[in-house]
Image: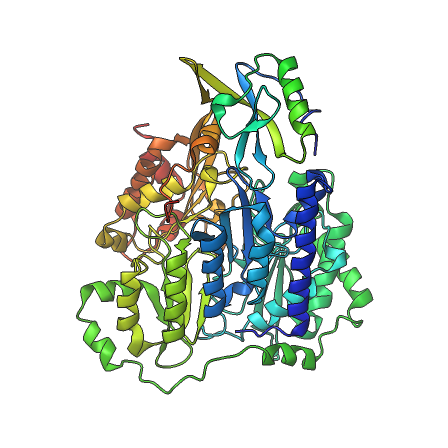
């Protein structure tokens, strides 16, 4: 956990006071909606179909049990008793009233949570690997650098009015759980030939209307140079990024139109002018940030405690353990992913009661810490393996032990037309139907790792382009239709999926996905060939034939 | 962004003006009495572009009461007013899924 200092606390509290005044002036008519809109967006407040929506940041996906309880409190007191965890490690409340927003934000500020820059054309919540700091083989904890970026970019005057929104993601593991290649800037910690730790910097990734996989702009940037290099990128973007066309305003378009070589030259020229200036990160600065992260005092524990041996006879426990429990850097400990994808439930939603109970479980079993992943699941990062059976029983009682992490029913979905004013089609009911179709755990296990991503419009909040199976809702003559892509992936081998054919109507989507999965089961070279690898090997055609032969 | 009043208005059937209430974001409809109602049945119905433009203009003028007014299609059936598309159906009736916690 990171401990905020007085500067952080003052900043967050001042922002609440400022926004309280802005809301008051809006409600009195002193501010028009045109004047107010940008102010509310800078504080994460959207207007959706039914109500205002508040998006709250969970920086690099790390929160304390105290903070999770406060998120539950806001859900209960100001909303309808639940929240929705998003693909960018935020939580959204769907029913909040403008008149209540200042009080809700004040309550959040008391525990160091805010909604600053969760919307608007600025630098958004810096996201990271939800296993940061505990993953085996990690270079170092990437959250140190994520926190530096958070502090540096928060209310940065030069980057508060960019051509368009700007998203960072950072990882320090070989396996990319932070989807860095689909971010405006992706950072991968690694060691150079001399054994020094630095960053591979990727730029120009992003989904939406015009998707691109990020390109490496510099293979190695030393830690001391991180902020100056990032600032050089942002300056070039701020200068040349298009402001005349919202659809061409993201940095990915600039990188694409200039070409990565030309863009890199521009950045390099800018960087050489400033690299040894005020933004050099001294060792002391980095260490000061590092010292404000607190790590648990782990016990020396056996890898295979008696409690775990005994529980291994319980098939239900074992099904959960195999999918939800991952190795930890410390012997005797594990990372536990908590699926927010129950059969028939909206992906990523958690009730206030579940949040409160999870906070209690985090206190009992995970040193009071919880993580949020971009897959819209939560994680307890420091669970002693001896405690796994007890934790599982407690999660099961809460409806939070669905054994489907990384399986076909672990679906990423945006809120879609049920909530979102931008959506063309519904996402959640499609996800719900798919979870029912594949509810049988044996079947899901037989299928193996398969990521389905659903977006209700081209803005791609459900990351459909990089789903192994991607589903995009479109509207045709007032009817919901869905385009299906296959072969996408969001990890270190990130790729955009390929369209398999014409869009299909709402009622056919689950049948089409079943056809695709059945084709995969028949076509895979061996049982452990993943869906995405079968598509890579065979291409789209056999799946297209299967889906459209009878349609 | 182009003001709704500067956008070309093209309606193909009975239409209403809808928006969200400023204080709480609730879905509201412009009435013939020049106020707002949460009931679609009380919405003023327009059938021609000029009528729609006038209704939208008076709605936009009430910046304090409503956010983002726009023209939306409706269907008239046996004297009842029904939403003209799925989006408006969802705005009127709520989400098509069960909420995690029933309100």
Count all numbered tags in the image, as a single digit.
Answer: 0
Between A73 and A339, the one lying in front of the other is: A73
Residue A64 is at least partly visible in this image: no
Image position of A328 (left or right of B58): left
Q: Picture coordinates of residue A226 (x, y %)?
A: 68, 69
Residue A137 is at least partly visible in this image: yes
Identify which residue is drawn at 67% across, 30% down. B62
Q: Is residue A166 above or below residue A9?
A: above
Image position of A361 (left or right of A65): left
For the C terminus of chain A, give its image quadrant.
Answer: top left
Q: Picture coordinates of residue A508 (x, y %)?
A: 34, 32
Q: How is the image coloured?
A: rainbow
The picture quadrant where one finds residue A363 is bottom left
Q: Picture coordinates of residue A86 (x, y %)?
A: 49, 53
Which residue sits furthest bottom? A300
Which residue sits furthest right? A273
Between B30 and A89, the one lying in front of the other is: B30
Identify which residue is drawn at 56% across, 77% down. A293
Identify which residue is drawn at 71% across, 65% down. A229
The picture quadrant where one finds residue A288 is bottom right
Which residue sits furthest left? A313
Q: Is residue A550 above or below residue A70?
A: above
Image position of A70 (left or right of A203): left
Between A497 and A69, the one lying in front of the other is: A69
Image position of A416 (left or right of A431): right
Identify which residue is drawn at 69% across, 82% down. A284
Q: Is residue B4 above or below residue A259?
A: above
Q: Picture coordinates of residue A290 (x, y %)?
A: 60, 78
């Amino acid at each position: 956990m990171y401990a905020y200092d007085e500067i952080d606390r003052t900043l967050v509290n001042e922002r609440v006071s400022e926004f309280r005044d802005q809301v008051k002036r809006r409600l009195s008519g002193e501010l028009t909606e045109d004047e107010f809109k940008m102010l509310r967006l800078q504080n994460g407040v959207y207007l959706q179909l039914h109500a205002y929506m508040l998006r709250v940041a969970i920086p690099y996906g790390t929160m304390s049990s105290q903070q999770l309880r406060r998120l539950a409190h806001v859900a209960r007191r100001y909303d309808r008793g639940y929240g929705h965890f998003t693909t960018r490690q935020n939580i959204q409340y769907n029913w909040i009233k403008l008149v209540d927003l200042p009080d809700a934000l004040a309550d959040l500020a008391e525990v160091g949570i805010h909604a600053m820059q969760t919307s608007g054309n600025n630098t958004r919540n810096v996201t990271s690997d939800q296993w940061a700091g505990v993953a085996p083989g990690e270079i170092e904890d990437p959250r140190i650098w994520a926190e530096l970026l958070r502090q540096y970019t928060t209310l940065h005057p030069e980057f508060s009015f960019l051509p368009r929104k700007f998203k960072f993601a950072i990882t320090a593991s070989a396996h990319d759980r932070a989807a860095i290649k689909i971010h405006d800037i992706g950072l991968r910690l690694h060691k150079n030939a001399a054994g020094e730790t630095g960053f591979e910097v990727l730029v120009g990734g992003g989904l939406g209307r015009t998707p691109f996989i990020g390109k490496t702009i510099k293979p190695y940037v030393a830690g001391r140079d991180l902020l100056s290099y990032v600032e050089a990128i942002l300056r070039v973007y701020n200068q040349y990024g298009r402001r005349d066309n919202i659809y061409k305003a993201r940095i990915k378009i600039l990188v694409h139109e200039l070409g990565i070589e030309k863009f890199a030259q521009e950045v390099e020229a800018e960087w050489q002018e400033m690299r040894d200036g005020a933004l050099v990160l001294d060792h002391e600065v980095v260490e000061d940030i590092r010292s404000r992260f607190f790590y648990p005092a782990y016990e020396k524990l056996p890898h295979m405690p008696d409690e775990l041996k005994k529980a291994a006879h319980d098939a239900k426990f074992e099904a959960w353990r195999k999918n939800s429990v991952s190795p930890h850097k410390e012997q005797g400990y594990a990372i536990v992913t908590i699926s927010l994808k129950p059969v028939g439930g909206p992906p990523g939603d958690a009730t206030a009661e579940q949040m409160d109970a999870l906070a209690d479980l985090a206190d009992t079993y995970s040193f009071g810490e919880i993580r949020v992943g971009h897959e819209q699941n939560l994680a307890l990062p420091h669970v002693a393996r001896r405690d796994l059976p007890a934790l599982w029983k407690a999660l099961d009682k809460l409806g939070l032990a669905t054994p489907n992490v990384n399986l076909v029913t672990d679906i990423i979905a945006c809120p879609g037309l049920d909530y979102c004013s931008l959506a063309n089609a519904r996402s959640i009911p499609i996800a719900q139907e798919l979870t029912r179709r594949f509810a049988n755990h044996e079947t899901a296990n037989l299928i193996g790792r398969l990521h389905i991503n659903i977006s209700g419009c081209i803005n791609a909040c459900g990351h459909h382009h990089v789903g192994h199976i991607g589903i995009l809702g479109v509207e045709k003559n007032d009817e919901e239709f869905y385009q299906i892509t296959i072969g996408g992936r969001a990890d270190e081998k990130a790729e955009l999926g390929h369209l398999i054919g014409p869009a299909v109507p709402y009622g056919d989507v689950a049948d089409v996905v079943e056809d695709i999965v059945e084709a995969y089961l028949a076509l895979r070279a061996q049982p452990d060939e993943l869906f995405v690898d079968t598509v890579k090997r065979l291409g789209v055609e056999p799946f297209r034939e299967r889906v459209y032969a009878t349609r | 962004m182009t003001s709704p009043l500067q956008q070309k208005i093209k309606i193909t059937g009975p239409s209403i003006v809808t928006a969200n209430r400023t204080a709480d974001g609730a879905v509201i409809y412009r009435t013939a009495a020049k106020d707002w109602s949460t009931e679609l049945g009380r919405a003023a119905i327009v059938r021609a572009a000029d009528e729609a433009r006038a209704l939208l203009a008076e709605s936009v003028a009430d910046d304090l009461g409503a956010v983002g007014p726009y023209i939306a299609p409706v269907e008239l059936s046996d004297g009842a007013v029904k939403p003209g598309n799925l989006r408006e159906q969802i705005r009127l009736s709520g989400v098509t899924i069960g909420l995690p916690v029933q309100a």
